[in-house]
Image: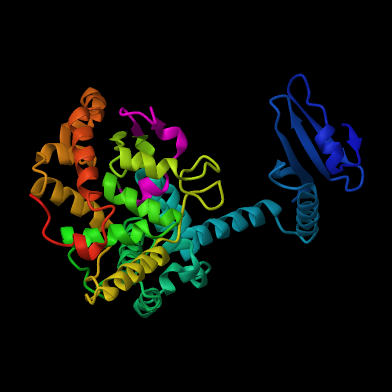
Amino acid sequence: MPKLRLTHAAVERLRLPSKGQVDHFDSHLPAFGLRASYLGAKAYFVMTRVDGRLVRITIGRHPALSLADAREKARQLILHAKAGQDPRQIEAEARRKKEHKRRTTFGGAVALFMERYVERNLRPNTAREYRRTLQGPDTRDWQDRPLSSLMKAEVLEVLHRIEGRGSPAAANRALAYLSKFFNWCLEQDLLTVSPASRVRPLSATRSRDRVLQPDELVWIWWALSEWPSQFGSLFKLLLLTGQRRSEVAGMRWDELRSFGTEEAIWSLPASRTKNGQPHLVPLAEASQNIIASLPREGPFVFTTRGTTGLSGFSKAKTELDQRVNALRAGAALPSLPPWTLHDLRRTMVTLMNEQLGIAPHVVEAVVNHVSGSAKRGVAGVYNRALYLRERRDALCAWSRWVTRHDRQRPEAAAGPAPA
């Protein structure tokens, strides 16, 4: 059998046999070698005697296992054999311990959960949230802990830490993700008791039913118009289009069709919508003007680095609140009651119907609320363009309604909205 000094370069250059497999023994450590197969595989092995019989033990494949690590592993196995131990049993025990750790530590169980449940069943954005909770800074100290050692008090400590950062809603979401994970572990017989059992949300989730009043919208729009930033433009588009924050923030230039014309369309692929359905958003003139005013610095319409969409919405929303309330203070008016960016979407849905008389089924189509059989098969493809003309008319009417006081000071425009 051929011998050569195994080096990384030699292993890389090694020619594969035209058929079968060939063993190449290391001239530096004779019992150590590399088996090359005509199928393209290269695997390190060691030959040693166990109970008087010569046995081959496969160590690992190249390049997943480095030459240096493989040679060191071969030395250890030879020493075990010389000490009268069976290297095969030692390897089997090491694999068993590794698998046991993979399944019974928090980090190992999380990896299984992500692989077998989250990645197979949940959308990428949801998977990202699970990863942030289960593999992020808040649970970093748990990763090498035995799963069964985690206590309810530690779960509560993590939740209080998140809430202490001013994120009660994030703490509630983290509890939901942790509870789902621990319940999955129970189903897989990795746990007998969930440390999240009977843990209640730290704060009640407020009902999200805030609809901004027409006079409130005037002040918000005015503040946005005086805020020369990408966030000001993005928040305007949230109101004018009624689409979700992540969808608008991730808008790409190649998603825009017939831009600059009356038939302009923003075409959202299924991978970027919450319900997994492609969605067409007609763009009114005001929306197009906002987009056209932005510099084209990469694939994303809204970006600070050119390669990713915008982030940092909480800070930007706080700045917007300060701008709105400063304007109102100048008119001797109190601050606006608390509201969220998602309230812009809800407000558009409500006021399209109440102020503009737009039919509910058209409004639902505008915001991509399609359910039941309309999501599936040929019907799903058809519904992508369902009521497209009506949607364009609705969004153009809404855009004119929102911007009707564009050139007026808020205090002059804050009276009752026209029916």
Instruction: Name the residue rendered at 78%, 61% in the picture.
Output: 83
- Residue 376 place in picture, x, y as percent: 23, 30
291 vs 48, left or right, is left
- Residue 268 place in picture, x, y as percent: 35, 36
Q: Nearer the viewer, residue 318 or 13?
A: 318
25 vs 282, left or right, is right
Residue 126 seen in the figure = no
Q: Tell me where the magenta segment starts and ends, as one range.
A: 244-266
- Residue 168 place in picture, x, y as percent: 31, 72
264 vs 87, left or right, is left
Instruction: Name the residue rendered at 41%, 34% in the picture.
Output: 255
Q: Is residue 264 magenta?
A: yes
**Number of marks in the rendered image:** 0
Residue 419 seen in the figure = yes
Indicate whether 210 appears above or below 334: above
Q: Quadrant of the N terminus?
A: top right
Q: Is residue 340 magenta?
A: no
Q: Nearer the viewer, residue 263 or 93?
A: 263
Indicate whether 60 appears above or below 210: above
Q: Nearer the viewer, residue 238 or 106?
A: 238
The colour style of the image is: rainbow
Q: Nearer the viewer, residue 27 or 355?
A: 355
> Splitting the image into 4 quarters, where does residue 318 fall?
bottom left
- Residue 418 place in picture, x, y as percent: 10, 51
The residue most toward the top is 18
Instruction: Name the residue rendered at 24%, 62% in the picture.
Output: 410
